[in-house]
Amino acid sequence: MTTYRWFYADGGEVEPEYVISHGNGTFTLNDELVGQWVSCEMSNDYFPGLTQRTENVLVEFNVVLETPENLRVTKTAQTTLSLQWNPVADAVEYVLQRKGPGDSDFVTIYIGSSSKYVDTALAEDTEYEYRVRATGSAFSEAITVATAPGVVDGKPVVDSPAILETISEPDGRTTIRWTDLGPEYVYTVYKAGRIVVAFDGASAANAYYTDENPSASGVEGYAIIAYNTVLRQYSTLVTTVVHTTAPPVEITSHEELPSGGIKLTWDVEPGMIYSVFRAGLDISAPHYITSGEWVDENPQAVNDYMLVAIYTDGATRKATFSNLYTVKRTVPFSALNVFWGEYDGGIIEE
């Protein structure tokens, strides 16, 4: 019979209850081990005294995510398509692929956290296939869409501006940027159904608008229309919604784990991802957190934590850092008796 024993990187043996099950060389480990480096030692009754140990490996979550649904495409110009799909819970990144004429297979055109993408510089009157997946999911079913022809019903097609990004600045202002269609176009921006500004597109620097006084309600709607002064035709109206304020973020509680780590928890807001900072450093990098908890596996004696929230829908705003959340880690006397000598039990602060 083969026996398996697991060890931490420092040589200590992993608690047996943390090894949930195994079969066919695959082991299921308790969540408490996520983020820990461990190794497995194997021995067999047929070879007494002979053992083998694997190299240390990092324990990570193995999560299979749902496939993104409702992939849809909107024609925003002759050569521009706007794609959108339903966000997937716990997804950190999405991979969007396109297959066009002459492509033998799908080509990756976007990797990022947003569930929206604007595909530009395409060929007129041409069919393209698209598919998308979340990191850890299967690809969605491919959909086919054709770009607009150069002429519809005998009239030239006027390009529509495509929204490039919408940003809520830390000082409260909101900025919208869109594709500059050229010097023959002028733009009109609407806010809540009213014209707020109109200007020409003589330079790419003009293809944006900054709202100095966005709505205090937290959400603002904008619309942009382009007018081709040569063809004397208007484009399709393009709309966008911007989060003008970010909800407050605060770490609400913590828990010291048997492994020595500190688990932080907070309330999750829809459409947000999070980063945890300690002493000014992002300890959750390179990944964003989509849940309402994070385990610091290597805390210090005194830890000053901050939390930052980021919108993931393209209306990106880094929230103001939460207030400092200080945790003074406690350890048993037994961990310090090499310095303090005998003890009579209890807990002290490091």
Image (spheres, rainbow, N blue to C red):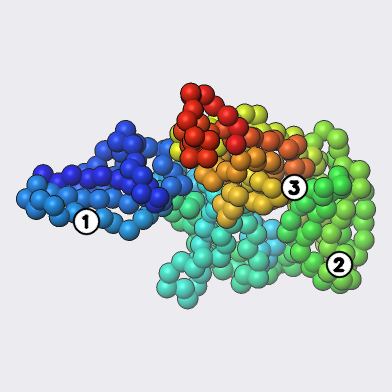
- Of marks 2 and 3, the one in the foreground: 3
Question: In this figure, which residue is indicated by the disc labeled 2?
Answer: 205
Residue located 74% across and 47% down the image: 318
Image quarter in which the N terminus is found: top left
Question: In this figure, which residue is indicated by the disc labeled 1?
Answer: 52
Ranked by sequence position, the earlier of labels 2 and 3 is: 2
Which amino acid, mark 1?
A: Gln
- Of all residues, the one furthest to the left in this rendering is 46
**Which SS class for mark 2?**
helix
- Of marks 1 and 3, the one in the foreground: 1
In the rendered image of this protein, does residue 122 appear above or below residue 113? Answer: below
- Numbered circle sitting on residue 312: none
Which amino acid, mark 3?
A: Arg
Question: Could you give the CA–CA distance between mark 1 and mark 3, rounded to whole angstroms?
Answer: 51 Å
Residue 136 visible in the picture = yes
Question: Could you give the CA–CA distance between mark 1 and mark 2, rounded to whole angstroms?
Answer: 65 Å
Residue located 46% across and 33% down the image: 334
Residue located 9% across and 47% down the image: 45
- Numbered circle sitting on residue 317: 3
